[in-house]
Amino acid sequence: MRCPFCSYNEDKVIDSRTAKDSTVIRRRRECLSCKRRFNTFERIEINLPLIIKRNSNRVAYDRHKVESGIRKACEKRAVSQEQIEDILNELEQRLLEHGEKEVPVAVIGEHVMAALKNLDEVAYIRFASVYRQFKDIGEFMQELQGLLKHNPDPD
């Protein structure tokens, strides 16, 4: 493992712990050259299906890209990193259970929207406006009205 501070190639592992869902191992490391400490995370590499984009191109599933979209939707909202990780982990589990070699991007978008709708409605609307590519305020209002119909204000 290359040190992120001095680029030395040797280190020692000081501590290893599994994450709460046991899918990730966190390792605390110390560089043998500069003695600075850093964390690494090990995740089981799984073969997730290719994603069929709207233009019919096939691309590899990119967890970081999905996470970035969720993070942008949740910006300045009371959504924790743990909740975002839960959405990603559940999505990946569903993709694996799907058993297909290729999955339309709509499967990912709809899963994320459903998870955000239950978690934070503002984040849901933000994500939906980008994912569904709202063309005007009318489409935006239609989505808001649908949300209000399903979740009437108790006051």
Image: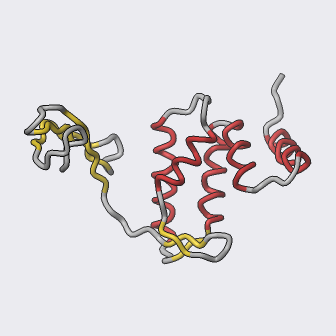
Front in this rendered view, residue 11 or 48: 11
Numbered-mark total:
0
Q: Position of residue 35 (x, y in %)?
A: 12, 32
Q: Hey, which quadrant is residue 70 in on the image?
A: top right
Q: Where is residue 118 in the image (x, y as percent from the top left)?
A: 65, 41
| Quarter of the view holding residue 55 | bottom right
Q: What residue appears at the point 54 percent right and 53 percent down from the top-left corner?
A: 66
Q: Which residue is drawn at 91% across and 48% down?
A: 138
State which quarter of the image contains the C terminus. top right
Q: Which residue is at the far top?
A: 155
In this rendering, the answer to whether 66 lies above or below 97 is: above
Query: For this view, does 93 lie left or right of residue 17?
Result: right
Q: Give the residue furthest to the right.
A: 138
Q: In this view, does 145 lie to the left or right of 94?
A: right
Please state if 19 lies on the left or on the right of 99 as rendered: left
Residue 150 in picture, x, y percent from top left? 80, 43
Q: Which residue is drawn at 58% across and 48% down?
A: 69
Q: Which of 7 and 72 is in front in this view?
A: 7
Name the residue furthest front: 6
Relative depth, front residue between 29 and 95: 29
Identify the residue shown where x is 50% and y is 39%. 83
Q: How is the image coloured?
A: secondary structure
Residue 80 place in picture, x, y as percent: 50, 33
